[in-house]
Image (cartoon, rainbow, N blue to C red):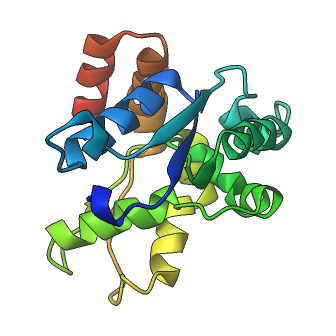
Amino acid sequence: MKMEAANTKGVIGVLGGMGPLATVDFMHKLLDATPAEFDQDHVPIVVSSIPQIPDRSAAFRGNGSSPLAAMIESGRRLSSAGAELVVVPCNTAHLWFNELRAALDLPMLHIVDAALEDVLAMVEPSAPIGLLCTDATLASGLYVERSQRSATSSAQRRWELPTDQEMRTLVMPGIEAVKAGQSDRASALLQEAA
């Protein structure tokens, strides 16, 4: 999704830390997508990167605390810092999107809507879409169900999803490697899954 600096009003708040690398990756992509010649041409951003927000996958499985209160607290920091729009560069955190948006009372971009918009612009309507994500994001149907309700997805999409074994041996270990800063191992595992 391209951001136009001239069309952006106010400050974008990045509710991050889930994980820290996803936050940095999002900010890098935002900078790359902004047509800027000078520092002042860039989109104004404030970031709250709090890695101690409870694990979203564990919470979804019922094995951990809900991250919602911590996400709301982090979002309120962004609001206090002047954010007029909030983004959350964590897929699984979007399982609490509606509650978070209601608590913050700020416009928010939904990661699935942005990802689907980009993917659907790149592929033919009959092309399958592959999805590599946490087990909680997969089990929740966050992408598949939202795509079926999306106005941008006029045709029924065919999803290529990892098997249970691929999730156990490739995808989740790959995601864990990302979180541990083992990018070479993560890349190898996730490329094999893809």
Left or right of 184, for residue 77: right
State the residue in front, 190 or 166: 190
State the residue in front, 31 or 183: 31
Residue plotted at (43% across, 24% down)? 21
Left or right of 37, for residue 96: right
Counting from the top left corner in percent of width and height, residue 187 is at: 26, 23
Above or below 36: residue 190: above
Above or below 29: residue 153: below
Instruction: Judge whether residue 149 can be spotted in this image.
Output: yes
State the residue in front, 70 or 38: 38
Instruction: Judge whether residue 4 can be spotted in this image.
Output: no
Residue plotted at (73% across, 36% down)? 77
Residue plotted at (79% across, 59% down)? 99
Above or below 156: residue 158: above
Image quarter in which the N terminus is found: bottom left
Image quarter in which the C terminus is found: top left
Counting from the top left corner in percent of width and height, residue 136 is at: 62, 44
The quarter holding residue 93 reads: top right
Left or right of 32, for residue 5: right
State the residue in front, 108 or 20: 108
Q: How many labels does the image show?
A: 0
Residue plotted at (48% across, 56% down)? 111
Counting from the top left corner in percent of width and height, residue 69 is at: 85, 40
Left or right of 111, for residue 115: left
Counting from the top left corner in percent of width and height, residue 104 is at: 77, 55
